[in-house]
Image (cartoon, rainbow, N blue to C red):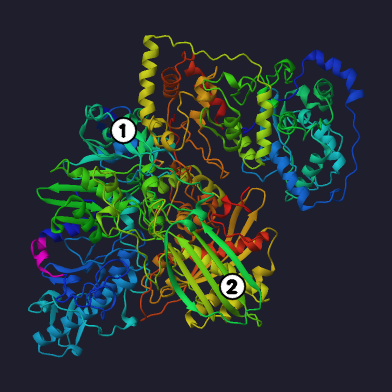
Amino acid sequence: MINLTVNGKLHQVDVTPDTPLLYVLRNELQMNAAKFGCGMGQCGACTVIVGDRTVFSCLYPIASVGDRDVRTVEGLGTAESPGPLQQAFIDHQAVQCGYCIAGMIMRAQALLEEIAQPTEAQIRAHMNPNLCRCGTHMRILAAIRSAAASGRITPRQKVQGA
Amino acid sequence: MASMFSKRRIAGASAGIVVLGAILYFALAWHPAMAPVSQPDVPLTAGVVSQGQRIAELGDCVVCHTGPAGARYAGGLPLRTPFGTLYTTNITPDRETGIGNWSLQAFRRAMREGVARDGQLLYPAFPYIHYTHVTDDDLKALYAFLMTRGAVHAPARSNELLLPLRFRPMLAFWNLLYVHEGPRPSMGASPVERGRYLVEGLGHCSSCHTPLNLIGGEKGGDYLGGGEVDGWSAPPLDALLGAPQPWTQEQLVAYLSTGLATEHGAAAGPMRPVVENLSRVPREDVEAIAAYLFSIQNKAVHNAAAQPEASAALANHVSNGKTVFEAACATCHGSGSAMSAYEQRPPLALSSAFNGSSEHNAVLTVLQGLPWPSEPGVTTYMPAFADVLTDAQIADVVTYLRVSAAGRPAWPDVNKTVANLRKESSP
Amino acid sequence: MKLPDESVDESRRSFLRTGVLVVSFALFAPSRLFAKKDTLGTEILAPNLPGSLKSNPMLDAWIRIDAQGISVYSGKVELGTGVRTALWQIAADQLAVPLQAVHFVTADTGLTPNEGYTAGSHTMADGGTAIYNASAQVRKMLLDAAAKKLGTSAERLSLKDGTIVAQDGRTLTYAQAVEGINLHRYADPVSPPSDPARYRYIGKSIPRVDIPAKVTGGPAYVQDMRLPGMLHARVVRPPSRGAVLEEADIDGTRRMPGVVAVVRDGNYLAVAASSEWQAILAMRDLQQSAKWHPTRTWFTPDELHQVLKELPHQDFLDADQPMVVDATGPRVKATTTKQYLQHGSIGPSCAIAHLDGDTLTVWTHTQGVFPLRAGLAGMLDMPIEKVRCIHVEGAGCYGHNGADDAAADAALIAAHVPGRPVRVQWMRDQEQMWEPFGAAMVTELDASLDSSGRLANWRYELWSTAHNERITNPGRLMPTWLLAKPMVPAPSVPIPQPEGDADRNAIPPYRIPGLKVTMHFVTQMPFRTSAQRSLGAHVNVVAMESAMDEFAAAAGKDATDFRLQHLEDPRAKAVIALARDQFDWAARLRNLPRGSGVGFAFSRYKNIMGYCAVAMELHFDEETREVRFPHIVAVADCGQVVNPDGLRNQLEGGIVQSISWTLHEEVLFDKDGVKSVDWATYPILRFNQVPAVIETFLIDQPGDSFLGAAEIAQAPTAAALVNAMARATGVRSHRLPLMRYPPFAG
Ligand code: FES
Ligand code: FES
């Protein structure tokens, strides 16, 4: 059994230590946000935050998590009560197929917790690891800008990271 | 990565040298300022400019002369050296902060002697000791090319150097030792000659691939015998036949022009921008470089792999390493994976990083990954694992691959290396 | 049973609710007298009816009303273009009920009408039109029935939130009104009129219904389905097409933890395990032990376009107007080439299949549940009624990607583990290597102006393999090629004009007296190709609109004026004029910074659908070969707009995707086969490369027909890009992708 804290909640999972975090989230914990896109750290569909680092969960061994908190889109809000970034994505209808979007939101969340008012260049550079095939980029950028402008995202408290 | 291509090259100076230098520098260090020009004094024709672009790419100018997130050629890249941190300068044609009012003659003097237009001595992090061998024509083309870049106003940042070195005339002494002025224009004769010109001149390969002495000079006796840059080991270029799969000229050309040799691995760290530049120059230039390097293979073939020693601690490393490998690496690097089946990526058993004498390249590649290619001809990418794996996990996986894949004795103290390199390479 | 999202849950409940009744409602018309297939492969039963009513003429195929509420059925699927919401809007407005009152069900062979494929920007035109008309007719029937029941006339009744209200205040619910009337009847060719002024939803940017779940981690995709007892499967593919399996350690893999089955059937290999990670480890194990023997070699990308011209082909003469004599003005001759493209879905294909007794249920993100059902039934030799395909969303597909093939994998593996649902997830390399590619093409244009500077003669030829290898027989499902008894794909047949296949938009919309357009339809496919957004239009519009620019310059005319002078259709002209003005074409053209260029292009998709004009400014850095896009303007006329914001979203996405195709994308291959198996070997546009600004403008045509939108921006964007590069650099290149070939590549 491996202990795992996700969005503040402690779970015990029965998996081998070589299991990537992605499959633990999706199958053991039945969470949908992190997606399988490539399994090679190339697309960002599986992006989550572990401790204070934004990571590709598809190649993150469950054994690496330790006692750090894993954060996923599920932890930012719900359909009934969306968090600030989620709300901005809804307001801008920043989705086409939406497969990339949960990863986009987590990467953007990490940025806004670090830099409350990023420049356009900072946003683009920060989001660069994540791919979108539908071409939703313009709206994703707009959503991030307006979430930043809303000032509703709390700066990150520094946690002990790897 | 902190300083992308930091040249650790800089003159150091001990107290004794200071005294010697004091005597000499009046004689050596004084150079007149050259008159500013109101516009470039060579015709900026398209042909010359495009020739100049090729020279710039062969010389990797943009790599050092572009700061983090800064405009191209506008300088500002920190070069961390054992003697302090230098910032590269603006070589755009801005009149105030760049080289906009330099004449060709001033430019040539800087390239060949390390003297700026105003007479100030340049630090040898700028490899004029190699550029001094570039022909007049090539320098003229390079000048024309730089003068047609967009002018960017970017004042130089002041260097953070050890006290005695802030006094630039000191450099005169160093120059006396290392600058052997003048072009070596034997190019065109044969690919090997052309290659030698590119390797020794523009390419300034030995800046990284030759070991340095205490004052930051290249050890003449061990030319291209392998050096170290930013924690990476720059492998010896005269022992190419000692690899587990001896290099061939064809593999070397592929490596230099695409960043990938299917029997050795992918260009990483400071070599990556070099191959990105080389992917753009005419193929015959790269073939010439390879031809020349193959003409200097003089080292005895050294590669009999010693058997790894078995021990309980090692077995533990290896088994933890295998766990990490399955989770984080096997999708790409497992045998039978897509990468090995279709893309002809080398098995890690052959990889230079796991067969070399030092674990640095393996560790740094895991920590930093390989960036997304910026040239269409380059297709290698690897995510960075600094935020994914702990020091112990990296040490485990590196040890696992060293022992199980490459079949070589484990490197000692990899844990410590990982911790150090992580510290040095984090921003 | 745990189900992926509300919509599926709903459809499931509705399935249970309606039970056997489902089979009793007829989707077949009494007569097949007129039977003929439409371009999406469905049979035309009633050619005089609007939209998809042609193939599904019964009203109750679309709308059912009972005590439990109003259900609307669509055979179209959500592919990420927002059509689910748009179709829903149409139904709600035409039935005069709030959105929430409609229970909206999409593509399920057990429940919905057969609308063939969701493709080709047809959804609004066909499905939207069908729902628009069926709903209006049902509304009228309800009012008439209510009038009779209330002893009044229909004109004296009003509709309010799903209730019928008489002037004296008496009310009837729809369910009460519908009692005693039979919706199982043929639709009428003409529907009662609707007043656009009364729409609450049509024409409004109603937020998409699927977005909240997608941004909060709700179950939204087939990948998110978890059925009780479900196994996880992975396939192991040969390293190239035609490779033969020599040996594989099946037993070794079978002994791995969690492995339930290892399937080997000829060259077909797959594993099924209790957990997904175990399935992956088993897949790796099998990959490692499998030894393959290649049987084919390919040509190189350099030879591709010559090879295309030499392969066996059928010729189609799309236009043949005699050449005119006065063609003495400037002449343009140009060859345009395009490499193979990948759809490159961000989520690799996935499907779940469950063989329960003699019934197979497949959850799939296919674009066409009905054709897939037929293909799967044929593949497994099962009666078609014993196979049910239910659409559940996947990642965007942009055409015929691996979705159907993954469904075939799931069905094949499920047949080996009867009773257990099997989820197959393709890996990234499997998707990129085995999906059908967007076809490579070569075209040749030879055209001239007359002595007065007007278009005179236009000869255009093109060579391409098929753009439509949809599932018309089991052999079109790629996994069947690997079986011990391989199946054979049906021969390629092009989509006829006016929609066209490789020759989509090959006929210019401009007035040209002498015109000859020939398609050389290559019937032997070196690499499997099938539908990718815009089909041949991408290349054909590049060739055409580039020539229009050259001719404009030669005739001393402005690029937009020259186009306007050769067009009559006022809607085409309006789109061009608005794009020109919103972009501030003349001023931008005058003030171009060094290295910058502006480009303009227009096309009407398939010459019969949405109109789109694109104007863009770009900057090309000769040294870094980076292309930046400071400003792009797109104008579209897609008839009556249902959801303006959804339409803009599609235009923006199409522009970004087309820039990526046109500048960077090509499938790498060599004599051993495909080499583009991940995002490093098949790079697509990233955040640091996307435009700074994209502005979109819509010309609405209330009351007019719906014209689709999902593919209209791709072709004009590519052409505007080629034209802008020509202005920025002084060099015109038609070798796509531009940045990988001279003169723009190193
Ligand atoms: S799925 Fe993890 S980066 Fe693509
Ligand atoms: S919205 Fe479809 S991949 Fe981004």
**From what the image shows, is residue A109 above or below residue C693?**
above
Pick the front one: C670 or A57: C670
Kindly identify which chain the residue marked by label 1 belongs to: C
- Residue C99 left/right relative to B79: left
- The residue at the point 72 percent across, 26 percent down is B161
Residue B93 seen in render: no
Disc 2 beta carbon < 8 A from ligand 2? Answer: no
Q: Quadrant of the C terminus of chain A?
A: top left
Pick the front one: B369 or C500: C500
Please report whichever mark, 2 or 1, sits nearer to the chain's N-terminal start. 1
Q: Element type at marker 1? A: strand
- Residue B425 left/right relative to C397: right
- The residue at the point 84 percent across, 51 percent down is B43
Q: Find the magenta span and give its range.
A: C17-26
Q: Is residue C20 magenta?
A: yes
Q: Element type at marker 2? A: strand
Q: Which residue is labeled 2 in the image?
A: C447
- Residue C364 in percent (x, y) is at 26, 53
- Residue B203 in percent (x, y) is at 70, 32
Q: Which residue is labeled 1 in the image?
A: C246
- Residue C12 in percent (x, y) is at 16, 57
Marks 2 and 1 share the same chain: yes
Kindly identify which chain the residue marked by label 2 belongs to: C
Marks 2 and 1 sit apart, C-alpha to C-alpha, by 55 Å
Report how many numbered discs are placed on residues in the image: 2
- The residue at the point 29 percent across, 34 percent down is C277
Q: Is residue C333 magenta?
A: no
- Residue B180 left/right relative to C205: right
**From what the image shows, is residue C649 above or below residue A11?**
below
The amino acid pointed to by label 1 is Glu
